[in-house]
Image (cartoon, coloured by chain):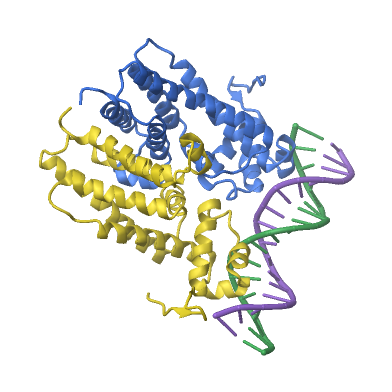
Chain colours: A yellow, B blue, C green, D purple
Amino acid sequence: MKIPEKFDALGQVVPSSRQRILEVATALFASNGYAGVGMREVADRSGLSKSALFHHFATKLSLYGAVRIAILEDLEARLVAAGPVADDPMLQLERWLDAVIDALAERPHAAPLLLRSLFEDEPLEPIDAEQSAATLGRILSRGRDALRIGMQNGRFRRVSVTHTMQSVIGMLVFHFASGLFGDQMLGHSKFAPDQVQARKEHVRAVLHGLLSLDG
Amino acid sequence: MKIPEKFDALGQVVPSSRQRILEVATALFASNGYAGVGMREVADRSGLSKSALFHHFATKLSLYGAVRIAILEDLEARLVAAGPVADDPMLQLERWLDAVIDALAERPHAAPLLLRSLFEDEPLEPIDAEQSAATLGRILSRGRDALRIGMQNGRFRRVSVTHTMQSVIGMLVFHFASGLFGDQMLGHSKFAPDQVQARKEHVRAVLHGLLSLDG
DNA sequence: GTCTATAGTCTGATAGAC
DNA sequence: GTCTATCAGACTATAGAC
């Protein structure tokens, strides 16, 4: 997967065509959805001809698959870096929540893309679908397991694990995908550092209220 | 807006062409998004020719606008029917939450469509955009005001109203829009009556944990 | 109100030269 | 790897008969 980097006369990294295509396609698919993006537009914004684009990605669907996999693998890498920690399941959950929020806040296209992949049921090419589902499955298992362990240890109130997962996903992914609507609701850009911090604290408060036993 | 109903020989209501088009288009836009739906497909599934469809809705965008407005007005009508009640803001919130969940559970296409309209920033025709924004604004004001009043009265813990609104929307709309993913997560259909009830109780528990003072 | 036919444009994808 | 040129088909929307 490692691609040798090239440098220009100033020592700046020159992104490979493949990398440029992926960045452009990520932004476009996030904003407009699969059907709302044309390969012509991807090619133009990548500074390539359509044929050159089709040389790198044989079909539109395989480009979409590559974009989705890249998002999920970035997310998993951040979760791996954020854990596991000591045997305090609430602390562990908070670390992971912060990692996910940072990921969604630093890459504004990640949340819309993730949201689309969770509710749109776009069929990927089988190989991509398998890889994408496997990565997503590992990501979700982390959260589910922390919830289960916390409940078994008697540190968390016993609530529905599946409904809690759905709520956490909704609170994280919807918020950072919510575009203009969310910014109007907040009165600020949701990507501003203080708003990102506020989101972390809010989600922590929600989970603490739901799971902690001193209620 | 009231259209005179017609009846067949058995006394069954015969839906008007307009009504059939709206139902078909709602399902298609919810599943595939604006760009992913063709007017040809809408016409075919409505049992009309393409030209007959364009007679009822002059443009694709105006059809999409009509679909979105219908969803929002149904939601608002249910909220109006669910309140206001006595001056217990938590009870009021719970009534509204139940009403929204019932609305999203009874009309499976409502949540995906609503979700799309909240994060996709598809520009509607100006008249539709105005009406749609006004209805959405009134819906959201109900929730915001209940939260504010509860905090001012000292019945709710003081938390961020805007972040709480974002979380509630995420918990409600994402959950019922989450398609196959959500059903796999739950292990059941999210539209099954017991799962709908479980969702109501879960969301209530989350809000109670966040807002109630006995923590 | 509904039809057939079609205009004009855009789509994903391909062929072949360099 | 990148280009120009092109394909067949789908798209939204319109024209005009009935």
Q: Residue at left 31%, top 61%?
A: A77
Residue A137, image quadrant = bottom left
Q: Residue at left 41%, top 35%?
A: B166
Taking depth in this image into account, of B10 and C15 the one nearest to the observer is C15
Q: Quadrant of the N terminus of chain B?
A: top right
Residue A199 visible in image: yes
Q: Position of residue B109 (x, y in %)?
A: 49, 37
Q: Residue at left 65%, top 33%?
A: B128
Against D10, residue B115 (above or below) is above
Residue A174, image quadrant = top left
Relative to D1, A65 lies left or right: left
Relative to B95, A109 lies left or right: right
Q: How many marks?
A: 0
Taking depth in this image into account, of A117 and B41 the one nearest to the observer is A117
Q: Position of residue B21 (x, y in %)?
A: 63, 36
Residue B21 visible in image: no
Relative to B57, B192 lies left or right: left
Q: Position of residue B95 (x, y in %)?
A: 38, 19
Relative to B113, A144 lies left or right: left
Outermost residue toward the top? B86
Against B33, residue A15 (above or below) is below
Against A152, residue B147 (above or below) is above
Outermost residue toward the left? A153
Q: Quadrant of the C terminus of chain B?
A: top left
Q: Position of residue B35 (x, y in %)?
A: 60, 50
